[in-house]
Amino acid sequence: MLTANEIRDSFKSFFESKGHQIVPSAPMVIKDDPTLMFTNAGMNQFKDIILGNHPAKFKRVADSQKCLRVSGKHNDLEEVGHDTYHHTMFEMLGNWSFGDYFKKEAISWAWEYLVDVLKIDPKNLYATVFEGSAEEGLERDNEAASYWEQFLPKDHILNGNKHDNFWEMGDTGPCGPCSEIHIDSRSEEEKALVPGRELVNKDHPQVIEIWNLVFMQFNRKADGSLEGLPAKVIDTGMGFERLVRTLQGKTSNYDTDVFQPILKAIANMAGKHYGDNEQDDIAMRVIADHIRTIAFSITDGQLPSNAKAGYVIRRILRRAVRYGYTFLGQKQAFMYRLLPVLIENMGGAYPELNAQKELITKVIKEEEESFLRTLETGIRLLDKTMADAKAAGKTEISGKDAFTLYDTFGFPLDLTELILRENGMTADLKEFDAEMQKQKQRARNAAAVETGDWVTLQEGTTEFVGYDYTEFETSILRYRQIKQKNQTLYQIVLDKTPFYAESGGQVGDTGVLVNEFETIEVIDTKKENNLPIHITKKLPEHLEAPMMACVDTDKRAACAANHSCTHLLDAALREVLGDHVEQKGSLVTPESLRFDFSHFQKVTDEQIRQVEHIVNAKIRANIPLQEYRNIPIEEAKELGAIALFGEKYGDHVRVIQFGNSMEFCGGTHVAATGHIGMVKIVSESSVAAGVRRIEAFTGARVETMLDNFQDTMRDLKALFNNAPDLTAAIRKYIDENAGLKKQVEDFMKEKESQLKSKLLQSVKEVNGVKVIKFTAPIPAETVKNIAFQLRGEITENLFFVAGTVHEGKPILTVMLSDNLVASGLKAGMLVKEAAKLIQGGGGGQPHFATAGGKNPDGLSAAVDKVIELAGI
Ligand code: ATP
Ligand code: MG
């Protein structure tokens, strides 16, 4: 029996023997593409070639690509674990032809590989072909069918509709019919009862699709019409785990050597047996699947977080933790304990797992622990919601409450439902769905973009000249209009451009396009499928006129200083903290720089200072930039340049060196480190377990910061009579102040007791009630203290009413003894009514109440009003 690793190798050697170049998998987490967060198919990394933005270096390519299908167009998350053949992360084996061979070879090689090489029994194979579409004016893909007929009987070739058998890259762009290969792995008895052809594409767990061959021959335009694609493309994708399962004679992907070791470890941990109970099995499959995804995302540079791709990863991790918690009794963090098994099994093929073991472990453990705390908070909240519902005589909680639990506490609906069921209750699911729809709509509205067709003025691809120039003569190749949030913008592609497009953490250049008639502002430069796009609010009127593309050089220089400084910081951090420091993210703008790196404790103030000193010394040394613009990647590695994990590099790379700092980098840099001026680290914080973040300023920004700092110091010194030792002067002032505060407190207590004795002497008896009435300029707190003390001393018939003013604000206070309250008087009611005279309001308990107001002049009248209202 072939092992998983042997099967992967056999695919590559087969296509190598058919003249294909074998290329590495692109990273699973995609950076620098606003339209896609994760690689979800083998073709993603070739999109720029398929779209014609870049020429194909090899016309025939094959690989095994790490894919993740958990968001956007392909989202299999809810299936995963419940069925046995969808994963979140999986490997897709694929072969491509860019304008070379087409349907005939694609089909016959797929057949040759499956049947002749791997010896799959052809009687278990079915192929689907596109049935055609009247509305598109497309007929059945008879061409593909005719090639299949050379290998398969007609009743194994099935027609498929547009949904299953017509592939599109997006709303616009390359598309075409596809042909899928399905395999029937049921027992002979079952096959005899129901023919496999009736189960193809019917979600039967033993009759599944393994390979999809896409024939891109059209281009979809924005108006929905199709035109022929000049260079036709073959794009195929075969699920590696599904192929392994077929060849190892299993009925579930999880029974193969890809998953068995992890499943065993999970079962051991839970003290259970995989295969005993369906519900437990689902939980074990979910965990076995998700631990791979999470570990690989982290090594690819995507940590769990609160936004975008990071949030997707966080949700996957939470899903696994929750299944473990609910079904396998895992009340403590457990996922991270599966990593040794995962690394033992996949670490050979993916060395990054080993290299980043400590980081993955820390991150997963901390995420688990924090989610378990959230779960507990959620459970408490749910308990309260259930108690409230029960008290109101209901057996259903509202959909809104269930949604709040889901949305705010990350509490999945099925867990809420499970707990409700255990308590004989339900949730209003209709209302929950409605809330969910509302939220989705909000997200859609925010993200909706209308993209027009490209208008091509000249054929060609862009040449970037920005490493050497900030101004360059150029012309427009193509442009299109986009509409987003009621704003119309234009994307312009230039023949040659000095504009740096946002990537590698450095923001895009801004500037202007100038021709003899007009000046158009470029508000940003971004890359889409490797194509630099200049974003403007206006289109030039004279589109064909030659123009100068001019970068805003001040911003560019500030950006370059920050970018070069990031490299120096990286090297200095390694020097001070150790070689475990690895870049985990960066943001370089003209204003500042941000650098995230792996490190397991807080960086101390002394270490920060040490780092600053090292970098500033290098800045003063004015080390010249040494740039290796286009060297073979092997040579770059030999030089010792640092590459990032999870970054996609071509076979030629650029290396940036300043002395002992040497990194793979495509960014723009200063000519010598002296241009950075100076660096100052302004903050150090934690972004996730094991990842720290520093933010720093350089050059003029440091100067401004020092100016502000100096101004503040000057002002402070002036306030302290230019004391030579400012710290000592401030400390003395604080001590003095504390002493004075104490004295004031003592004084107020003294005053309080004097006032109290005076008030005791002023008691007036009215109809047997002891009335104490006074007005004075003292704080409310003092009045309150006195009132309570008097209440302690005069336990019967006390009627205390005070009108006081403090800092211009009038306050009315009333205190009654219990027997007066019992006789029907209410302090709260009295102040509330009387406070109208001081333009205020208030209230309190029956025995004690206060009211504040705006009009101190009405205070005396208000005090009298209280007595009048009491009717004594
Ligand atoms: P299915 O209908 O089974 O979800 P699909 O139509 O989404 O498959 P494609 O987008 O054509 O699949 O992907 C090509 C191949 O990748 C499939 O034939 C299948 O073998 C594999 N594949 C797709 N999705 C998954 C997944 N979630 N897990 C494992 N393999 C997958
Ligand atoms: Mg699918």
Image (tube, grey):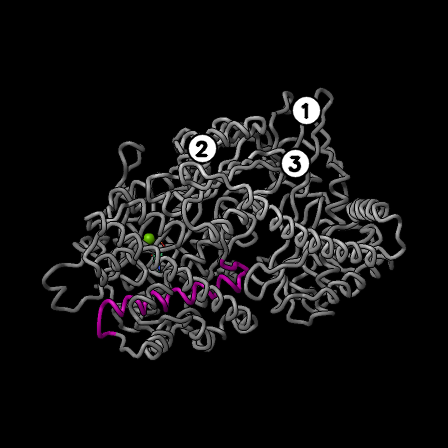
In terms of sequence position, does the residue under pointer 3 or pointer 1 come before the other? 3
Q: Is residue 119 visible?
A: no
- Mark 3 and mark 1: Cα distance apart in space: 13 Å
Residue for point 37% across, 72% down: 258
Q: Is residue 181 above or below residue 50?
A: below
Residue for point 39% across, 72% down: 4
Q: Main secondary structure of the magenta part?
A: helix
Please tell me how crowded label 3 is: few (under 14), some (14-19), or many (20+) other residues with Cα within 10 Å: some
Disc 2: which residue: 867
The magenta stretch is 275-304
Check if mark 3's residue and mark 1's residue have beta carbons within 8 Å: no
Looking at the image, which is closer to me, 279 or 79?
279
Q: Is residue 609 visible?
A: yes
Q: Which of the 4 image quadrants contains residue 608?
A: bottom right
Q: Is residue 356 above or below residue 777?
A: below
Q: Position of residue 419 (x, y in %)?
A: 26, 59
Please tell me how crowded label 2 is: few (under 14), some (14-19), or many (20+) other residues with Cα within 10 Å: some
- Mark 2 and mark 3: Cα distance apart in space: 90 Å
Kind of residue sitting beneath label 3: Asp
Looking at the image, which is closer to me, 433 or 419?
419
Q: Classify mark 3: helix, strand or loop.
A: loop
Which mark identifies residue 495? 3
Q: Position of residue 843 (x, y in %)?
A: 43, 38
The reply to whether the residue tagged 2 has its Cβ within 8 angstroms of ligand 1 is no
In terms of sequence position, does the residue under pointer 2 or pointer 1 come before the other? 1
Magenta-span inclusion, residue 608: no
Q: Position of residue 422 (x, y in %)?
A: 21, 61
